[in-house]
Structure formats: C-alpha cells, structure tokens
Image (cartoon, helix red, strand yellow):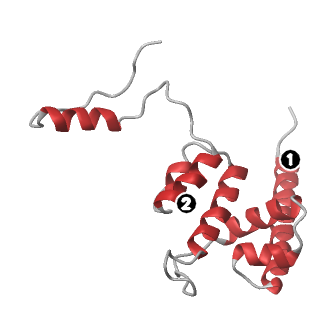
Amino acid sequence: MSDERPKINTQGLTAEEAQAARGLMRHLDAPTPTLAEFIRHAELYGTELVYETAEDFLGESELMQLLLELNRIDGKPAPGHRFTKPTKRRRLTTAQQIKAAEYLRAEGAPNSRIATHLGVGVKRVETIFKEARRRAQEAEETLLSDEVGEPVA
C-alpha cells in the first residue's frame, strides 16, 4: 500500500519543528481508537475536543455512549474540591437527547436513570420519548407519501 498522506510544507521550519509536524500527521496504518480509549483519554487529560475527535472514528451508538460518559466525567468534582462540581456539562440537542434516551432505554434503564444521565427531569424524558414517537411517525408518513407519489413504470 502506498503512503498517501498529505505532504507537509516544512519550508521555514527548523528541523525539530518539521519532525514534530510530521509526528502530528495521522498514519494510515495506525489503529483506530476505541470508545474505551476515548473515555480513558478524557479521564486522564480532560474532555476538551474528545467528542469532536471521536466523531471521525466512532459510530452513532458509540458516540452517544461517549457523550454520556463525557458528561459524567465533567460532572465529577475537581481533585481537591470534594463538594464543588464544574458546570461544564455539554448541552444536548433534542435529536441527541432522543438518540441517547433511546439507547439507554434499549439498555434497560428506567426513566429516572435516563433523566440522571441526560441531566434533565423525568417529565422531560417522557417528553423526549413523545417527541421521538412523533418524529418517527412523521418520517413514516413522509416515506409512505413519497412511495404513493411516484409514478409506476
């Protein structure tokens, strides 16, 4: 297999800077990071840009798991601050809340646990599931109307 990595413009860089720039390039034969590795990285070094990086490597289900874990990690007290919690939790879009709630329900979690993971109340979880059903119904109706509207050849 040929090395198809983009070439780095090292013009104007010192030898050390050029070597560091080459080291930052993603190798084509490098193993793809796993969900567990992203979580471990977030626990060790913080959650900055972990989700954004993981979007290139993980599937939708694993991204939801990662998002929930990042919120859990962000909710932990900082070392030496036993009773204070950072307010850095990620706000989820309604679509992300629906996906996360459906994932957690498929895992067998009750609404109270889903609410805790999403950082919302139990009533909001019920609203999320109603919204999910409404969206699924609209998508199904759109699909049916598209099939009926097509001319038969």
Nearer the observer, disc 1 or disc 2? 2
- Which amino acid, mark 2? Glu
Outermost residue on the top side: it is 1
The C terminus appears in which quarter of the rendering? top right
Q: CB of mark 1 within 8 Å of CB of mark 2?
A: no
Percent position of residue 54, x then y:
55, 49
Percent position of residue 85, x then y:
56, 83
Kindly identify the residue that appears in the image at 47 percent across and 26 percent down.
28
55 is higher (above) or lower (below) than 10: below
| Residue receiving disc 1 | 147
The quadrant holding residue 100 is bottom right
74 is higher (above) or lower (below) than 60: below
- Which amino acid, mark 1? Glu
Chain-order first, disc 1 or disc 2:
2
Res. 47 mark: none
112 is higher (above) or lower (below) than 2: below
* Number of other residues with Cα within 10 Å of mark 1, as a class: few under 14, some 14 to 19, many 20 or more: few
Residues 16 and 109: in front is: 16
Residues 107 and 135: in front is: 107
* Number of other residues with Cα within 10 Å of mark 2, as a class: few under 14, some 14 to 19, many 20 or more: some
Percent position of residue 67, x then y:
63, 62
Mark 1 residue element? helix
Percent position of residue 75, x then y:
60, 76
Give left or right: position of 75 versus 25. Answer: right
Outermost residue on the left side: it is 12
The quadrant holding residue 123 is bottom right
Outermost residue on the front side: it is 80
Kindly identify the residue that appears in the image at 51 percent across and 56 percent down.
50
Kindly identify the residue that appears in the image at 86 percent across and 76 percent down.
111
| Residue receiving disc 2 | 43
Mark 2 residue element? helix
Give left or right: position of 137 versus 96. Answer: right
